[in-house]
Image (cartoon, rainbow, N blue to C red):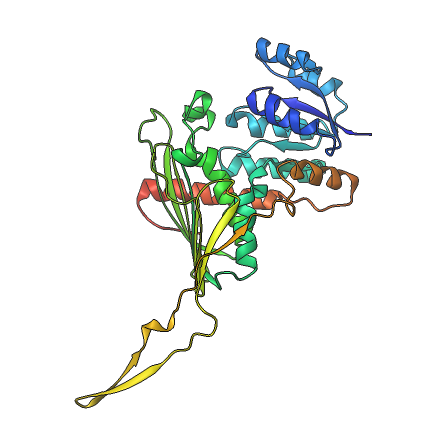
């Protein structure tokens, strides 16, 4: 029997992506109900074959859900998720989990107290471009990385701050919209402790919220990761750029099927010359030792990650007791701590110790 799903909110993301994903043959879930305060959205839910509720209390009381998916504006995520867990249901919220650490910490506390599952729809851990970059780093294609750049620009995937996404009290803004995905990818890929967070976050054209954000994370080893999201950037820089001690990698676009790698020749040797200069003996290193190979191009392998629906497949395994949860609450909280540090850094103009 498929696991039953109830939706809190039936906006575009829920009625489009989530409902369509749940109805895939390889995803063992069944959408049965939706709660929404908007009559038009309730009518859309009924047209899709769901039971529609205008009352949260009735939605929770009548439901026999294995999973509740919260897909409202960001400022409602924490309260609705906690209400659902306290009513006995497992919960997945849309990203971001909430607007700040205090709200996420409350969600985790309720999850631990009630014994209900809590996770977040960080589906971009299955983006093909991210999977390829992560694979390349793990395979040592560039050696030990010392700089990672991740960007989303308007010309290669960024979007406008429209509707509630442009409202501060609703938890809008680019850092909480796209930035939370990009930071989650970096933190999922790099597990070492963070030393500092430095950021510039500001509105360029938006009236209330940020539409530009650059966050620079320095990890304990010295590795630097830079995330940049720009709503108004008509000439984009590469989606990914990675530098390592044995080479470099670039990937132009989100969802790109290929990455380009330039690697330092493995057989290159350091040649040293000694030159007498007055009373000193000067050691000169021949900088030509770093010979660069031609570009190596490799296709993105989409099969290991499966695609965005893999997140739902993982949840099914967790509910069946056969798999470990991939998007863990502690990871969600760590990402939110970086976001809070980024806002603080931008406001104070300082690097924030993590």
Determine whether, in the image, residue 26 is placed left or right of residue 344.
Answer: right
Count all numbered tags in the image, as a single digit.
0
**Whether residue 223 is visible:** no
Closer to the camera in the image, 226 or 156: 156
Question: Which residue is located at x 68 percent, y 17 percent?
Answer: 57
Q: Return the residue found at the far right.
A: 1
Residue 53 location, quadrant: top right
Closer to the camera in the image, 23 or 53: 23
Task: Residue 258: give x, y in percent of width and height.
Answer: 51, 47
Q: Which quadrant is home to the N terminus?
A: top right
Q: Return the residue found at the far front.
A: 294
Q: Quick check: 89 above or below 187?
A: above
Question: Which residue is located at x 38 percent, y 69 percent?
Answer: 290
Closer to the camera in the image, 181 or 85: 181
Determine whether, in the image, residue 107 is placed left or right of residue 323.
Answer: left
Determine whether, in the image, residue 245 is placed left or right of residue 123.
Answer: left
Residue 333 location, quadrant: top right
Question: Which residue is located at x 68 percent, y 36 percent?
Answer: 312
Residue 222 location, quadrant: bottom left
Q: Return the residue found at the far left.
A: 278
Question: Which residue is located at x 55 percent, y 34 percent?
Answer: 97
Task: Residue 308: give x, y in percent of width and height.
Answer: 62, 37
Task: Residue 298: give x, y in percent of width and height.
Answer: 53, 52
Task: Residue 76: give x, y in percent of width and height.
Answer: 54, 25
Closer to the camera in the image, 130 or 200: 130
**Whether residue 302 is visible:** yes
């Amino acid at each position: 029997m498929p696991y039953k799903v109830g939706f809190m909110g039936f906006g575009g993301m829920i009625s489009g992506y989530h409902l369509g994903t749940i109805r895939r043959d390889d995803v063992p879930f069944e959408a049965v109900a939706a709660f929404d305060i908007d009559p038009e959205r309730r009518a859309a839910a009924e047209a899709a074959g769901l039971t529609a509720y205008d009352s949260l209390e009735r939605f929770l009381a009548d439901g026999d859900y294995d999973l509740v998916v919260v897909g409202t504006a960001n400022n409602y995520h924490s309260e609705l998720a906690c209400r659902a867990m306290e009513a006995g249901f497992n919960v997945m919220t849309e990203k971001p989990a909430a607007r700040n650490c205090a709200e996420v910490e409350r969600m985790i506390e309720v999850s631990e107290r009630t014994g209900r599952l809590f996770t977040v729809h960080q589906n971009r851990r299955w983006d093909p471009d991210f999977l390829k970059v992560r694979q390349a780093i793990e395979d040592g294609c560039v050696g030990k990385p010392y700089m990672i750049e991740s960007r989303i620009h308007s010309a290669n995937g960024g979007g406008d701050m429209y509707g509630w996404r442009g409202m501060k009290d609703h938890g809008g803004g680019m850092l909480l919209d796209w930035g939370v995905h990009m930071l989650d990818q970096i933190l999922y890929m790099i597990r070492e402790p963070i030393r500092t967070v430095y950021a510039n976050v500001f509105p360029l054209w938006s009236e209330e919220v940020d539409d530009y954000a650059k966050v620079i994370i320095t990890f304990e080893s010295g590795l630097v990761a830079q995330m940049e999201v720009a709503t108004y950037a008509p000439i984009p820089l590469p989606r990914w750029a990675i530098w390592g001690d044995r080479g470099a990698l670039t990937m132009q676009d989100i969802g790109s099927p290929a990455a380009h790698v330039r690697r330092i020749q493995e057989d290159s040797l350091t040649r040293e010359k000694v030159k007498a200069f007055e009373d000193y003996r000067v050691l000169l290193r021949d900088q030509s030792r770093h010979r660069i190979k031609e570009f190596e191009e490799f296709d993105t392998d989409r099969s290991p990650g499966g695609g965005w629906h893999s997140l739902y497949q993982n949840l099914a395994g967790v509910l069946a007791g056969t798999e470990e949860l991939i998007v863990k609450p502690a990871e969600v909280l760590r990402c939110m701590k970086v976001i809070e540090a980024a806002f603080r850094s931008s406001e104070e103009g300082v690097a924030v110790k993590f």
